[in-house]
Amino acid sequence: MASSLGLVMLFLSCAISQAFLVSSSNYGGLFPDLYQFSCPQANDIIWSFLEEAIAKDPRMAASLLRLHFHDCFVQGCDASVLLDNSSEFKSEKEAGPNKNSLRGFEVIDQIKAKLEQVCPCTVSCADILALAVRDSVVLSGGPYWEVPLGRRDSKRAYFNKANVNIPAPNSKIQTLISLFNRQGLDEKDLVALSGAHTIGVARCVSFRQRLYNQTGDHLPDAILEKNYYNDLKSICPTSGGNNNISPLDIASPNRFDNSYFKLLLLGKGLLNSDEVLLTGKVKKTQQLVKIYAENEAIFFHQFSKSMVKMGNISPLTELKGEIRKNCRRVN
């Protein structure tokens, strides 16, 4: 009887918490202070977990950034990317752009478990991910921005959309512009958000084409700086070693700064999707690469604006979706 009563009380508390979120969302809007009264400890809890995780593994900051990006580009920022396989749907984790490469799920799980202890049924997985990414950037030396909150979690994953909506590392400039435009993002957002590659690594399978067969003629990409090209060949052979990794930014791989753009100007961009921002013959993106290479403050300002914009792609609000208790499965 006692256990049954406990379950009823938990359900009621979840219903009350979720009703509070609906009434606070001002007809679907997102607000930075949403959890000020319902879970005032949320920001401190998330920060403390990330501080520890990034101290242990500096790559984790970039991994969480990528997780958020891959979530938002598939049916909006709804934490669908965090869901495991179920009888109802196939997980986005199994999709081509994500399989064996997305990381950071355990960090989100740990944060969620703690928040459920302190503020049950209140902070969504989608909001946790958005806040975790902001804090990861700050802990890596990048800019701070206010994160609008109030996203709810999806009740399913979108495996097929994950296979078509996420830009491939060998994308050409027009493909990148088209995929970003589809999400309501423009060339400014494309270049600024690509600057997230100032931290993190990429697998050999993502850049092998540039080293050995860039245009189908069994020759390397002529844009690559010679010494950089030779270094990459030692990491990434013609076959095998698919999971060998190289920093996206060889100058400061764990520090969020503008060296990514400086390296593009030197022919040291790792992925084709990086280099085409400069060489793709789109004047706007070429200009922005040069501006951000020269002025880190301008890059930081636009990156912050673009992160807020991306974080607001098709959020589930009010009575749509749910507040998951466990980020890996629906309630």
Image (tube, rainbow, N blue to C red):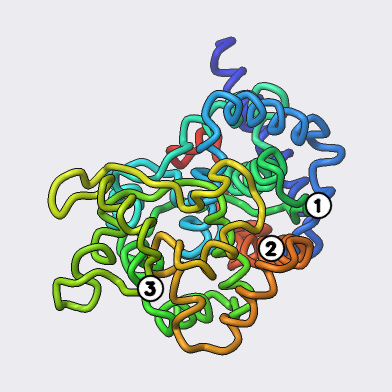
The amino acid pointed to by label 2 is Phe
Q: Position of residue 199 (x, y in %)?
A: 55, 48
Q: Position of residue 35 (x, y in %)?
A: 80, 42
Closer-to-camera residue (55/76): 55
Label 3: how many residues lie within 10 Å, few (<14), some (14-19) or many (20+)?
some
- Which residue in the protein does label 1 denote? 32
Q: CA distance from mark 2 to mark 1?
A: 18 Å
- Which residue in the protein does label 2 denote? 303
The amino acid pointed to by label 1 is Pro
Q: Position of residue 296 (x, y in %)?
A: 73, 61
Lower position in the chain sequence, tag 3 or tag 2: 3
Verify CB contact (< 8 Å) between mark 3 and mark 1: no
Lower position in the chain sequence, tag 2 or tag 1: 1
- Which residue in the protein does label 3 denote? 223
Closer-to-camera residue (305/240): 240
Above or below, comparing residue 187 to residue 319 in the picture: below
Q: CA distance from mark 3 to mark 1?
A: 43 Å
At a point 44% along the width and 37% down the height, the residue shown is 328
Nearer the observer, disc 3 or disc 1?
A: 3
In the rendered view, does 196 fall on the left or right side of 272?
A: right
Furthest residue toward top = 2
In the rendered view, does 228 fall on the left or right side of 204?
A: right
Q: Position of residue 103 (x, y in %)?
A: 43, 40
- The disc label shown at residue 182, or none: none
In the rendered view, does 242 fall on the left or right side of 306?
A: left
The amino acid pointed to by label 3 is Ile
